[in-house]
Amino acid sequence: MKTSPDIVCLGEPLIEFNRPREGDGRTWLQGFGGDSQNVAIAAARQGASAGYLTSVGEDWMGDAFLELWKAEGVDASRVTRHPSAPTGVNFVTHSAAGHKFDYLRKNSAASLMTPDTLPVDYIAGARFLHLSAIGQAISDSARQTCDAAIAAARAAGVKVSYDTNLRLRLWDLDSARRTIDAAIARCDVALPSVDDSQQLTGLSAPDAIVDYYLGLGAPLVALKMGAEGSLIATSTKRERVAPHKVAAVDATGAGDTFDGAFLARLLAGDDPATAARYANVAAALSTRGYGSVTPIPRAADVLSELERA
């Protein structure tokens, strides 16, 4: 009997406070964030089975996350709770330059995860392990935990999906480059964004960026380019996938929505370009509302939009 979901995500959840641009400057919308947990919810809303590995505090925020995951059908049976460390918090503000993140996450429950707490059997029973550079950057022990999870997945023949999400408030660029390059070399699906990758690689052209990541050893690269769509590449084939135009108000979590939708469609049997077309639409739809989780579309909405496109 299979006891693991198809997609297991690992990382840090963050209680989110999002201040809309058109508000009075005093109104904050409370929601949920954290890139890896956004991916789990996005995948679940597309019909995939998804689970989450993390630690949350024994606080109202940890309670809220457990209630959220239950409602969303995300398996949290292996989530642990720290008796004294808090659940992390994320603040999102908006300006003409885009959205900006500020955090209260130092010594959070998730940042205190250690390799010995990893449920290796749970990872081994999945089809994909998904994680990101943020999970590696929040602390040394979290980075070791992510490395151990990758090793466990590879030993069990589980594919590794990896997002380069770059947060330079968490670490310096040289450390980020070394760690991210090493993770890309051990992953099966690389999910970089063009903005992050330009900083990480020093390259500007999308084709050069995917060549770089393919050269590190990733068999499949899905480069997210925002309003320019995505570029999907293997060693033998590449295809630019057109963006889906919407009236966007908040791009928070759009890349995570792409990741979850892309993995869900790969598991459903789509080829990478077809999965990316679906994921582009899902990511675009997620920008029509505020917050990371609330606007993530469900499969019926994405399919309906695809029919009209």
Image (cartoon, rainbow, N blue to C red):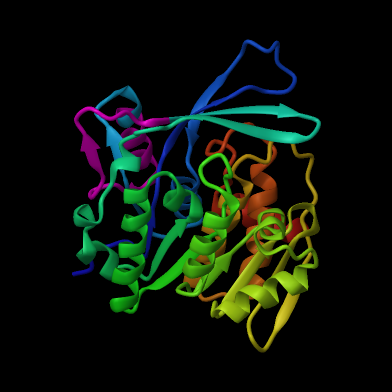
Specify the farthest residue to the bottom: 236
Residue located 50% across and 46% down the image: 35
- Image location of residue 10, percent across then percent down: 37, 53
Residue located 47% across and 72% down the image: 187
Whether 114 is among the magenta residues is: no
| 299 in relation to 156, above or below | above
- Image location of residue 141, percent across then percent down: 31, 50
| 237 in relation to 167, above or below | below
Whether 83 is among the magenta residues is: yes
- Rendered image quadrant of residue 69: top left
Give the camera-side residue of 302 and 92.
92
Residue 53 visible at all: no
Q: How many marks?
A: 0
- Image location of residue 309, percent across then percent down: 78, 58
Residue located 59% across and 52% down the image: 173
Give left or right: position of 200 versus 3.
right
Position of the N terminus by quadrant: bottom left
Give the camera-side residue of 53 and 114.
114
Residue 99 visible at all: yes
Give the camera-side residue of 179 and 126.
179
- Image location of residue 188, percent across then percent down: 49, 75
Q: Which residues are magenta?
A: 63-88
| 122 in relation to 301, above or below | below
Give left or right: position of 135 versus 259.
left
Give left or right: position of 95 versus 86.
right
